[in-house]
Image (cartoon, rainbow, N blue to C red):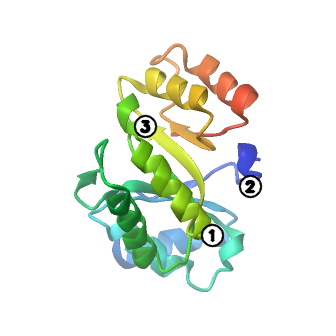
Amino acid sequence: RLGRTEWPVSDTVLGTGAIRGELGTQIVRVALERGVNYIDTAPDYSSEGSERAVGEAIQGFPRDSFFLATKWCTPVGHLPAGTPVEDYKQAVEDSLARLGTDYVDLIHVHSCDEVDRLLDPNVHEAFAQLKAEGKARFLGFSSHTPKLQDVASAAIDSGKFDVMMVAYHHGIWPGLSDLIERAQTEQDMGVVAM
């Protein structure tokens, strides 16, 4: 159960950072056929090649049989704090076009290293509009930066995030286990380890 999303996520999920082209499409199809039901992609993975490969692969699979996550960014990089609401929305519209779907289950604030970017009022307004339009269901963030613990703590405190995807390593970020526990007990957030 992926926290308050209620999604029964497979134990192993598919990150698609380096995939593209026909081989990438085959990898995603094989994963779906073998029971992986969570796919993570982003516009800047393989210069949008990942989203295109995922989009090709998911055709023919019932849309409600997998959980699809992408990120708020462009093929050339992150959207900084203060990005206009319409630009945030356009980034998701572009992802939907590449993915060939009407909605994504989850949008992450991508590789977040700044609390300002995490809590940018414009990103939250854009998400509210996209959710109302049926184009996005849940909001999350990903982090694997030196400020991971600060970002995760702010996300938990805000109550605005459904999922967090964090780098997990036993020797780095010694407070991460406590943050994961807080995320689950205080906010019922889903947690994805990368």
Q: Position of residue 33 (x, y in %)?
A: 66, 73
As measured in the structure, the alpha-carbon distance from the residue carrying label 1 to the one carrying label 2 is 16 Å
> Looking at numbered disc 2 in the image, what kind of residue is underneath it?
Trp
Q: Is residue 136 at all visible to an observer of this figure?
A: yes
Q: Is residue 14 left or right of residue 148?
A: right
Sequence-first disc among 3 and 1: 1
Tell me if mark 3 has few (under 14), some (14-19) or many (20+) residues whose alpha carbon lies within 10 angstroms of its own: many
Which label belongs to residue 7?
2
Q: Residue at image x 65%, y 76%?
A: 63
Q: Residues within 10 Å of mark 2 (few under 14, many from 20)?
A: some
Describe the element under mark 2 as helix, strand or loop.
loop
Disc 3 to disc 1, how far (Cα)? 31 Å
Where 151 falls versus 53 (above or below)? above
Q: Is residue 68 above or below residue 6?
A: below
Question: Please, what secondary structure does the residue beneath circle 3 have?
Answer: helix
Of mark 1 and mark 2, the one earlier in the sequence is 2
Residue 184: quadrant of the picture:
top right
Residue type (three-letter) at the residue carrying disc 3: Leu
Question: In the visual, does 42 lie left or right of 190?
Answer: left
Q: What percent of the width, then of the height, locates residue 185?
A: 75, 27
* Label 3 vs label 1, nearer the camera: 3
Q: From this viewpoint, is residue 25 visible?
A: no
**Camera-side residue of 174 and 24:** 174
Q: Badges 1 and 2: C-beta atoms under 8 Å apart? A: no
In front of the other: 41 or 11? 41
- Mark 1 = which residue? 32
Mark 1 closeness class: few <14, some 14–19, many ≥20 residues within 10 Å: many
The quarter of the picture where residue 157 lies is: top right
**Eye-nearest disc, 3 or 2:** 3
The residue labelled by disc 3 is 118
Task: Classify 74 as above or below 191.
Answer: below
